[in-house]
Amino acid sequence: MMMPVNPKIYHIVHMDRLSSILHDGGLFSDRVISQRANAGTMIGMNQIKHRRMHELRLETHPDLYVGDCVPFYFCPRSVMLFLIHSGRSEDIVYKGGQQPIVHLEADLHSVVNWANQNTQRWAFTKSNAGSYYFEDTNDLGKLGELRWDSIAATQWSGVHKEGKQAEFLLENHFPWHLVEHVGVFSDVQKNAVESLLSNQTHQPTVEIKKAWYY
């Protein structure tokens, strides 16, 4: 598969975190969230979150830990969502399944332009930024080196697993106004999210996206 002309990036959260995200005006890194009172259900893997905050630094920005950044995938229906859906990982405390999980979609180039204008550092990786062997860069000219066939794959075991976990990382904070779409599982989540957004200045489109789920 060729690289999309306008690549999109995706962050998944439990919908009970949306209220705090909207109050904050966007998403914060795990580093910031770990220093605050509970703001909703956390869905990540605790051991990997710790590694990202305390062990894994970016080669592009050597003083920046992965956990200092807000992470995004280049696709919906991520490997992490599958682990949440299947309940196969003992390191994921959350066991509530995929239905309450929402996808926040943004445009990669719009995010990079905003970051460059606001001196926010960013990078992207060719594989899982929670591993000990990922490569990172902040050269958009290298986007074509990502495994776009793996990123687009719906059956991602074997050769596709690593490439599908490529990440985009934005330092510290991701502003809400850059979210273009919210993908949800069903009408139940759609109605709840639209209600939360009803008094917001920025209201991204909320759509049922069953193809984004398992």
Image (cartoon, rainbow, N blue to C red):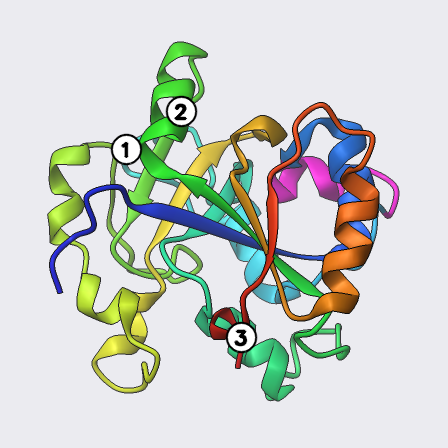
Instruction: Give the residue pinned by disc 2.
Output: 121
Where is 163 relative to 153, above or below?
Answer: above
Residue type at the position of mark 1 = Thr
The quadrant of the rendering that contains the N terminus is bottom left
Q: Residues within 10 Å of mark 2 (few under 14, many from 20)?
A: some
Residue 163 visible in the snapshot: no
Residue 5 is situated, as x and y percent measured from the top left of the image, at 19, 43
Where is 21 relative to 207, above or below?
Answer: above
Residue 3 is situated, as x and y percent measured from the top left of the image, at 16, 52
Left or right: residue 166 versus residue 20 is left
Q: Which mark is residue 213?
A: 3
Residue 68 is situated, as x and y percent measured from the top left of the image, at 54, 36
Magenta stretch: give its range.
28-38
Sequence-first disc among 1 and 2: 1
Q: Spot the residue most to the right.
A: 37
Sequence-first disc among 3 and 2: 2
Residue type at the position of mark 3 = Tyr
Query: Residue placed at 78% from the left, 49% from the top?
Result: 17
Q: Quadrant of residue 128?
A: bottom left
Instruction: Give the residue pinned by disc 1.
Output: 60
